Image (cartoon, helix red, strand yellow):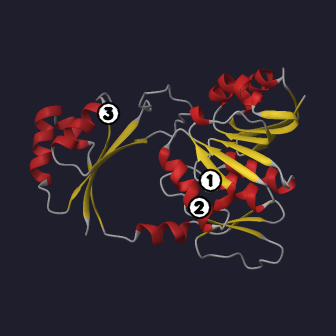
């Protein structure tokens, strides 16, 4: 079934107000997008982050009366705002198939490959393959922050180690650790969809028995051999004392989701407990790694 899509740059209008208007007119969904390539890295908890130039996009059934909707919009917000509105008909697509077409097997390091379900690299000799469907969770390996962690794991396989994946997303790092020999992994996230995606992907990769999942408040009283935290700089700084307690003496720490200008502050937050190495950098992001004193 096709859909009708309306989009416009909010300009001086409140995107939240526009969203409410479209929802009142029967929109199936309303999304906010960056209209000026302005990154938003760390929203405050409980807030909806918005860009200074925000594009609002509303999706409607194919038989929705868009002409009447646009007339109401002009009455409410004026002809100038209406002139910014773009109307488009979207054909029905197999969205899962489209995702698979755009996401191909990717190698990280020497032997670690992330694959969309069913796809394989040209040569699988010696390869460690991870079949992945992120679902609604973050983490496919395409983002530099995840790629840095995967490359680190490929260079430092956690053989028979206990691993804490803090901010597990799709479970990609947890599964990579298990495929590379970890004895057990605990995946932690604040989003129940991420926990579900992690469990589903672990089962898809036949490592479900080695993965436990839970929310941060459910962490056991346990110190791990390796802690992976691919989140963002401010949470990493705030969580430093808690995360440090989760790493055994001599254990390893890998922190990602950090901008180059934030690396010094994150390093300082962990310096009381860890000896950190110089940051690895990729596409404007850095990854810190160190060992517990």
Residue tagged 3: 15
Check disc 1 and report its element: helix, strand or loop: loop
What quarter of the picture does the C terminus occupy?
Answer: top right
- How far apart marks 3 and 2 lie (CA) works out to 35 Å
Q: State which quadrant residue 39 falls in.
A: top right
Q: State if disc 1 and disc 3 touch (CB < 8 Å).
A: no
> Looking at the figure, which quarter contains the N terminus?
bottom left
> Is 162 above or below relative to 249?
below
User: Residue 284's quadrant in the figure?
Assistant: top right
Determine whether, in the image, residue 42 is placed left or right of residue 15: right
Residue holding disc 2: 201
Give x and y (percent) for residue 227. 76, 40
Taking the spot 53% from the left edge, 55% from the top edge, the residue there is 197
Q: Is residue 131 above or below residue 155?
A: below
Q: Residue at x 60, y 52 (%)?
A: 139
Q: CA distance from mark 2 to mark 1?
A: 7 Å
Q: Nearer the viewer, residue 288 or 225?
A: 225
Q: Secondary structure at mark 3?
A: helix
Evaluate if marks 2 and 1 touch, with contact meaning CB atoms under 8 Å apart.
yes
- Gap in angstroms between the C-alphas marked 3 and 1: 33 Å
Closer to the observer: label 3 or label 1? 1
Residue 128 locus on image (x, y percent):
77, 68
- Closer to the N terminus: mark 3 or mark 1? 3
Q: Viewer-proximal residue, 85 or 255?
A: 255
Identify which residue, 108 or 168, lies in the foreground: 168
Disc number for residue 171: 1
Among the two numbered marks 3 and 2 on one chain, the one whose residue lies closer to the N terminus? 3
- Pick whichever, 281 or 84, lies toward us: 281
- Residue 258 position, x and y percent, is 69, 34
Where residue 51 sits: x, y (%)? 44, 32
Left or right, residue 127 beside residue 84? right
Are the residues tagged 3 and 2 within 8 Å (C-beta)?
A: no
């Amino acid at each position: 079934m096709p859909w009708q899509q309306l989009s416009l740059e909010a300009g001086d209008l409140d995107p939240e107000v526009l969203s409410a208007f479209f929802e009142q007119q029967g929109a199936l969904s309303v999304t906010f997008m960056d209209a000026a390539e302005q990154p938003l890295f760390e929203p405050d908890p409980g807030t909806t982050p918005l860009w200074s130039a925000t594009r609002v996009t509303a999706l409607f059934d194919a038989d929705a009366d868009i002409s009447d909707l646009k007339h109401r919009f002009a009455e409410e917000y004026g002809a100038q705002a209406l002139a910014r509105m773009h109307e488009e008909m979207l054909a029905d697509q197999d969205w899962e198939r489209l995702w698979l077409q755009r996401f191909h097997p990717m190698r990280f390091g020497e032997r670690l490959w992330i694959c969309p379900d069913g796809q394989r690299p040209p040569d699988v000799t010696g390869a460690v393959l991870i079949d992945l469907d992120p679902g609604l969770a973050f983490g496919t390996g395409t983002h530099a922050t995840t790629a840095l962690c995967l490359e680190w794991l490929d260079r430092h396989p956690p053989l028979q180690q206990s691993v804490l994946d803090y901010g597990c997303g799709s479970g990609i790092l947890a599964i990579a650790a298990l495929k590379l020999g970890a004895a057990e992994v605990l995946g932690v996230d604040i989003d129940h969809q991420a926990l579900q995606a992690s469990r589903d992907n672990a089962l898809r990769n036949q490592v479900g028995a080695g993965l436990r999942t839970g929310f941060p408040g459910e962490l056991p009283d346990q110190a791990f051999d390796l802690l992976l935290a691919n989140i963002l700089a401010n949470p990493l700084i705030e969580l430093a004392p808690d995360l440090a307690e989760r790493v055994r003496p001599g254990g390893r720490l890998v922190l990602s989701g950090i901008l180059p200008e934030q690396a010094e502050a994150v390093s300082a937050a962990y310096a009381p407990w860890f000896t950190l190495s110089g940051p690895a950098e990729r596409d404007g992001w850095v990854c810190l790694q160190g060992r517990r004193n």
